[in-house]
Amino acid sequence: MRSRRIAWLTIIPHLVGLLPLVLLLWRYWQGGLGPDPIGAAMRHTGRYALTFLLLSLLPTVLRVTLGITDLPRVRRAVGLYAFLYAAFHLLIYVGLDYAFNWKLLIQALPGATYVLLGLAAFLLLVPLAITSTDGWVRRLGRDWRRLHRLVYPAAALVILHYAGVFKELRAGPVVAGILLALLLIVRLPPVQQWMRARRKPQHAPRG
Amino acid sequence: MHPIHRSEITPEHVYLNRRRFMFGIGALAASALVAGAALSGCRPPEATPTTDPTLAPGVTPSPSLAPQAQTDTDELGNSLTEYDVITGYTNYYEFSIIKEDVTRYTQDFRTSPWQVQVGGLVEQPATFTLEELLALGQEERVCRMRCVEGWSMIIPWVGFPLARLLERVQPTAEAKYVRFETLYAPDQMPGQSSRSFDWPYVEGLRLDEALHDLTILATGLYGKPLTKQNGAPIRLVVPWKYGFKSIKSVVKIDCVAEMPVSLWMASSPNEYGFYANVNPNVDHPRWSQATERRIGEIGRRPTLMFNGYEEEVAALYEGMDLTEYY
């Protein structure tokens, strides 16, 4: 039973992680991305990146609230998919939206506040992706956890980036912001202690 | 004489999908049919010969015709944006905030009968039926459309100069601005139930801008009647300003003394000004306006001052600080 659960926990994140990419390519192939495929592909990959980034913050919440402890590998896979889609998102922006026209891109970047926010978030995610291997986890020891707290500012920047894209404030970034706030609140030490205390009595001997 | 248009042979959804798949190919089949088309810019063509008698001035374009423009480029040599792209990618918040979804929500929108009430500070206030407005002229105007969001299209509108309508009602000496209003009908326009905005959509122009020959009221597109998602039955087109100035489905035009407050000015005054002239040197607070992506193409191009109409309109803003009056 135990080994089967581990097998599923290894496979499912990859199935879920690759599915959006397959669907995106299929829709492109079918012409389903609409009159502006570049914009559509950017929106989709951006949303996938944000979704996986928020999902990567969930295992800790499940550990604190429900005591599920065997999800670190799932978390790593989910985090890497967040990085993968962020990389696609950036590549589409540079390679298709700007067609690698560095001169125009450099001309536009100083005024492009929301693009800079997204770029900053991506740059914060790069060291996290690089140090995601077992070797780096061992080598960095306690520093690994400290380094990977960069995911919090990265997620906040991503949501500001998302909110900045549209002419007006939209529901999407607001909902994402609320979800991020909830995922972070559960991590506060007093909240963790309270959650742990709430779970304990069930296991404690009676009387 | 005309070969059968592709859209007539293939079922439309298949045809659209196929065209979308081939994005980046800007050549327009329909336009190639017109031999010796004159390069008419966003200015009145000099007695442009029409190849189709139903497109003669004063006559409503036939809805049954395949989309067809009289030229295949604007006066700067930019290829027209494909009909399917112009009609499949529209910013019309009254129906949906998703550009690709607008068309679906406009299906039950009633554009006939239609009236436009023209009044305010004028000598001869009057209500015009759509038929009376169509009689004011049906000329093709190929215009660049630059959205404040950073994308652009080249669109062959059919319409007439707004000045021609204003001549009819004769603005008084007190009139300094023109205020436009879109239909308010939440039962037909689901987006108007959203309280994010103060409906109905309102836009405004200074009187001299409104009287400029580049400012038109459009009633057609690609030689066909205006599609609902593009602002049927009648909309404003001000090609040197960001697209949101070009208000759709207009029902009310008033000459006024004070500068009107547009929907976008009311919504976010530090981001959207009254003038909203296309200007690569004045960025939106959250993004650059230096470049634009032509929908259907890969890559970007530099945005032109006044959207490339600098020669025609710069004089309107002489001595004005365009950073302050954005």
Image: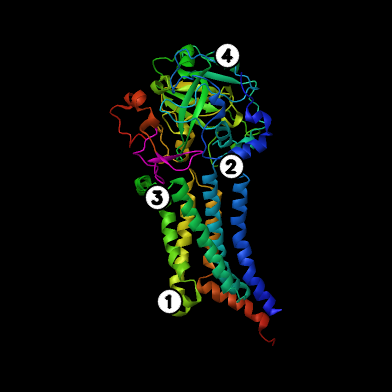
Residue at image position (54%, 56%) is A176
Q: Residues within 10 Å of mark 1 (few under 14, many from 20)?
A: few
Q: Magenta span: helix, strand or loop, mainly?
A: loop
* A205 sits left or right of A148 in the view: right
Chain containing mark 4 = B
Secondary element under disc 2, as helix, strand or loop, is helix
Magenta range is: B277-301
Residue at image position (47%, 47%) is A96
**Residue A36 position in % (x across, y down):** 54, 41
Q: Quadrant of residue A193?
A: bottom right
Secondary element under disc 4, as helix, strand or loop, is helix
**Mark 2 and mark 3 residues within 8 Å of each other at the beta carbon:** no
* Residue that mark 4 sits on: B132
* Residue that mark 1 sits on: A143
- Tag 4: amino acid: Glu
**Residue B118 position in % (x across, y down):** 52, 18
Chain containing mark 1 = A
The nearer-to-camera label among 4 and 2 is 2
The nearer-to-camera label among 2 and 3 is 2
- Tag 2: amino acid: Phe
Q: CA distance from mark 1 to mark 3?
A: 32 Å
Judge by depth and name the residue closer to the eye, B182 or A130: A130
* Residue that mark 2 sits on: B21
In which quadrant of the rendered image does the N terminus of chain B lie? top right
Secondary element under disc 1, as helix, strand or loop, is helix
Residue at image position (66%, 84%) is A204
